[in-house]
Image (spheres, grey):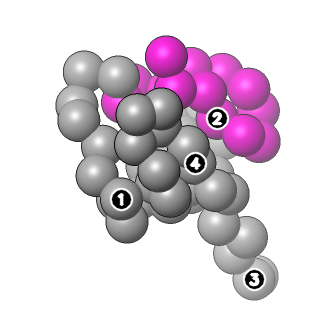
């Protein structure tokens, strides 16, 4: 299961097959994550400047 690094809620991404460089958006808080590794999947939070 892939969890949001910001709010720690599960993201609906485990049915897909993430690829390195993919951007996953948390539906709960809107945080964007970049896939930096697969097997196991590792995400990096993308800090957005506002
Ligand atoms: Zn989140």
Q: Position of residue 12 (x, y in %)?
A: 39, 25
Real-space Cα separation, disc 1 to disc 4, in angstroms: 9 Å
15 to the left or right of 39: left
Please tell me which residue is depicted at 65% across the width and 66% down the height of the picture.
46
Please report whichever mark, 3 or 1, sits nearer to the chain's N-terminal start: 1
User: As displayed, is residue 35 above or below residue 28?
Assistant: below
Circle nearer the N terminus (3, 4): 4
Location of residue 38 (image quadrant) = top left
Q: Name the residue under label 3.
A: 49
Look at the picture and state if 18 lies above or below 44: above
For disc 4, the marked residue is 43
The residue singled out by tag 1 in the image is 20
Label 1 neighbourhood size at 10 Å, few (<14), some (14-19), many (20+)? some
Mark on residue 4? 2
> Which residue range is magenta in the image?
1-13
Circle 4 — which element? strand
């Amino acid at each position: 299961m892939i969890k949001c690094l910001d709010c720690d809620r599960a993201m609906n991404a485990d049915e897909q097959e993430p690829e390195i460089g993919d951007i996953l958006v948390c539906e709960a808080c809107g945080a964007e994550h970049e896939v930096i590794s697969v097997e196991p999947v590792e995400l990096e939070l993308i800090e957005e400047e506002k």
